[in-house]
């Protein structure tokens, strides 16, 4: 596999929610570990607190990865910052807080590529999603990260609206399942996307070839329990240009073979 993506050689080693196999996902320690491991990109999820701050967390509820309960969007940033977002993975990570996007950009911007997935599921009002999109765009521009941050979403309407808000930010279309009756190439092209990021279970060699002919890169992802060496090797054989790996060291070892 040849080529480069934003200055990094392919296949791209993408740390899924940071080095989430060994560190609490979507936290500064997980991102720092990914940088130390030599990952090319960190992937993170962002949604909005009740008072409109872009908080970095995957779920729209708090129970799985923090000491809190209920919806993320029902809490202010100050309330969310008092929660423990690391102790669930071991005592060594106790006291780790939920980061906000400016913290991540300040700590890692310019050191590594960053994929920001905008989560709209937990936002009750359309205007809240619009505000979150604008906040992310403004942060990318204010921190001078236009050339190293990619916005992705599994909600195509979010990507369409982001493109309307800003014609230059880099976008990726996230596929959450089989895109029935959809021309994936056309979807990506319509928003000026750089890549299609599908669920690994839905990726075929034929789809990879189709996207590559259109100049679109393919970065598949997988949740547990399928984020494994076997899955990584299968993605590489299909011609994927990288992988969202919970263990970036594991993928890097396969990619360098």
Image (tube, rainbow, N blue to C red):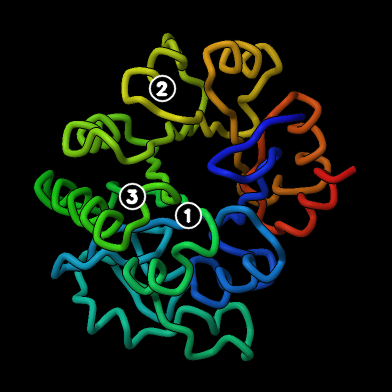
Q: Residues within 10 Å of mark 2 (few under 14, many from 20)?
A: many
Residue 193: mark in rendering? none
Q: Is residue 41 left or right of residue 236?
A: left
Would residue 71 be visible to someone looking at this image?
A: no
Q: Nearer the viewer, residue 107 or 45?
A: 107
* Front position among marks 3 and 1: 1
Q: Residues within 10 Å of mark 3 (few under 14, many from 20)?
A: many
Query: Eyeballing the image, is 206 above or below 17?
Result: above
Q: Which residue is mark 3?
A: 119
Q: CA distance from mark 2 to mark 3?
A: 18 Å
Q: Residue at x 66, y 39 (%)?
A: 242
Q: CA distance from mark 3 to mark 1?
A: 16 Å
Q: Label 2, on which residue?
A: 188
* Mark 2: secondary structure: helix
Q: Nearer the viewer, residue 110 or 12?
A: 110
Instruction: Determine which of the numbered discs, if any, sits on residue 114 in the image.
Output: 1
Q: Are marks 2 and 1 in contact (CB under 8 Å)?
A: no
User: Residue 107: image x %, image y %?
Assistant: 45, 74
Q: Horizontal and vertical percent for residue 198?
A: 55, 31
* Left or right placement of residue 182 versus residue 224 in this view: left
């Amino acid at each position: 596999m040849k080529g480069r993506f934003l200055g990094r050689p392919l296949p791209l080693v993408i740390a899924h929610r940071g080095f989430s196999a060994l560190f609490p996902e979507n936290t500064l320690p997980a991102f720092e570990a990914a940088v130390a491991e030599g990952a090319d990109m960190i992937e993170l999820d962002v949604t909005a607190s009740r008072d409109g701050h872009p908080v970095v967390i995957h779920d729209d509820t708090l129970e799985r990865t923090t000491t809190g309960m209920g919806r993320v969007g029902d809490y202010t940033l100050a309330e969310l910052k008092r929660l423990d977002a690391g102790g669930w993975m071991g005592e060594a990570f106790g006291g780790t807080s939920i980061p906000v996007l400016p913290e991540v950009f300040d700590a890692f911007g310019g050191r590594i590529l960053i994929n920001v997935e905008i989560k709209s599921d937990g936002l009750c009002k359309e205007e809240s999603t619009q505000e979150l999109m604008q906040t992310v765009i403004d942060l990318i521009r204010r921190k001078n990260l236009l050339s190293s941050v990619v916005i992705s979403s599994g909600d195509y309407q979010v990507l369409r609206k982001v493109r309307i808000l800003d014609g230059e930010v880099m976008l990726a279309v996230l596929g959450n399942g089989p895109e029935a009756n959809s021309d994936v190439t056309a979807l990506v092209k319509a928003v000026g996307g750089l890549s299609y990021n599908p669920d690994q279970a839905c990726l075929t060699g034929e789809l990879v070839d189709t996207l590559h002919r259109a100049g679109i890169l393919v970065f598949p992802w997988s949740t547990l329990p399928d984020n494994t060496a076997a899955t990584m090797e299968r993605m590489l054989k299909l011609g994927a240009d990288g992988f969202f790996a919970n263990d970036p060291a594991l993928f890097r070892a396969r990619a360098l073979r």
